[in-house]
Amino acid sequence: MHFFGHRPGSLRETLAISLPLMLAALSIYLMYFFERCVLAWFSLDALNAAVQASSLSWAFWGGMTIVAGMTEIFVSRYNSQGQPKTIGQTVWQTIWLSLAAAVVLIPIGLFASHYFYVPHSAESSYFRLSMIFGALNPLVYTLTTFFVGRGKVKWILALTIATALFNAVLDYALIFGVGWLPSLGATGAAIASSISLSLQSTILMIVFLKKSNRERFGTNQWLPRPSMMLNFIKVSAFPAILYNVELWGWSLFYSMMASTGTVHITVSSLCQSLIYLFTFIAEGLSRGTTLQASAYLANGQWRTIRSVLRSAGIILVMCFAIQILFLAISPDLFLSMFLPMDEKSTSLIPLIQMCTWLVLLYLLLQGFQWLLSGLLCAAGQTLPMTLCGVSGLFCCLLSPTYFFIAKNGYSVAWAWTLVVGYSLFCCLTYFWLFKRLRKQLSLAESSSPPPQVVPMPAEGFYTERAAAQ
């Protein structure tokens, strides 16, 4: 088996599959990245409020994006197998799941925000709006996969850029205030994101339901099919659990940074912004290699998985080299996008630069962590991976962060060193699980009966670990 006519597991094949998925992931991250830029220009306090509130809101609805994103694998399969009428029906199942999430998220946003933040504070307002419109995030992912899964990347890229630019303009108008519009700060950023997501999802839905798509892809087959929904949930259950636990962990991490002091949360907020800028690479690559591994495992091509891992590793290292070059040539470019050059913020530059290099190292390790987790998920090794990930989160990140940073006030650079250590732990444990799996597959391949490792369903498996951050 091979994809797009390329040699199985080759660099070209991995790029051909993963690049469209990177662009799909970019559709969400660009909006949040531009939002962080404008908020930083307005006020570092507003930026810090948005970072804390958004981290918590992602912890509530982030897991749904795994189930929503899985649709791309099914769309790609049915499209390549000449079953276009099944595509619309498949997409509708995760549309219903995304809308069902709103039934839970909206009441939390309306009635529970005061349990997490001071009433009427910037954090509370941002969290409330993020929860009320939170279901639009998996909905946008779902509708995007209808196009990306069929190779319609250019149209999605154009819509992504247009939406991101619209959101940036709206951010500026609502955060700073223009004409009759008052200055709303972090609340304005939440309103802008909500409007942009609403517009993007509306445009995607209109195109999804247009006559040609209804006739060719069956996008009018909107009736819920519980058995298909249940299959999506079963396949993504453990990765979704791990993803949500990670997001809750990151929310606690930023809360500890905020409780320690202004410097800690300010530097961490800027670090999160840098993560937003680049994390789509790891996410798209993880999704693509999961698709490859799932297909090859289902067809008994065990040895090809090593080629997939090698090709993806080359891509990650190349991207890391570009990021390093970016900072080496112009180290102040990132700071100028986010940091107002007053006396107070200028004093933070050496500390921010140190943490920036730590973040780049974390992004490289994160890429390998997500890559290995995708391969393990494709082989059905979700439970041991989840146990390792959760134990690493609490033992290597949250517990030492509480002891060293929150209780003893160590520098924020130590906090991001712990982040790197946590990601390194996950990489090593996932690699150990992968080596153990490879040994099992090699033994099974040379013996009878067939391998006992159970791959994901033939349709493939989609895993997404959204900016854990």
Image: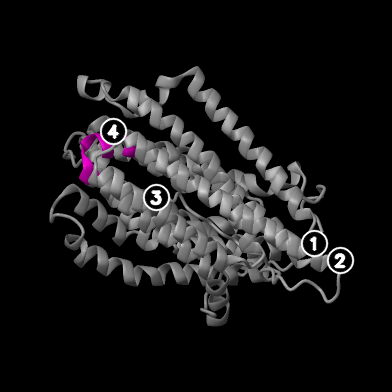
Left or right: residue 240 versus residue 34 is: right
Q: Are marks 3 and 1 in contact (CB under 8 Å)?
A: no
| Spatial separation of the CA atoms under disc 4 and disc 3 | 26 Å
Residue located at (14% from left, 54% from top): 118
Q: Which mark is residue 326?
A: none
Name the side, left or right, on which 157 lies relative to 446.
left
Residue 62 in sight here: no
Of mark 1 and mark 4, the one earlier in the sequence is: 4
Dividing the picture into quadrants, the one containing residue 70 is: bottom right
Asked if marks 3 and 2 touch (Cβ < 8 Å), the reply is no
Q: Toward the viewer: 325 or 93?
A: 325
Residue located beneath label 2 in the image:
446
Q: Which residue is denoted by mark 3 in the rendering?
A: 397
Foreground label between 1 and 4: 1
The residue labelled by disc 1 is 442
Question: In front here: 215 or 28?
Answer: 28
Q: Which one is earlier in the sequence, the residue at label 3 or at label 2?
A: 3
Magenta part of the chain = 258-269
Where disc 4 sits, the SS reads helix
- Measured in 3D between alpha carbons, the distance from the residue under mark 1 to the one under mark 2, in whole angstroms, is 7 Å
Q: How many angstroms separate mark 3 from mark 2 (CA)?
A: 41 Å
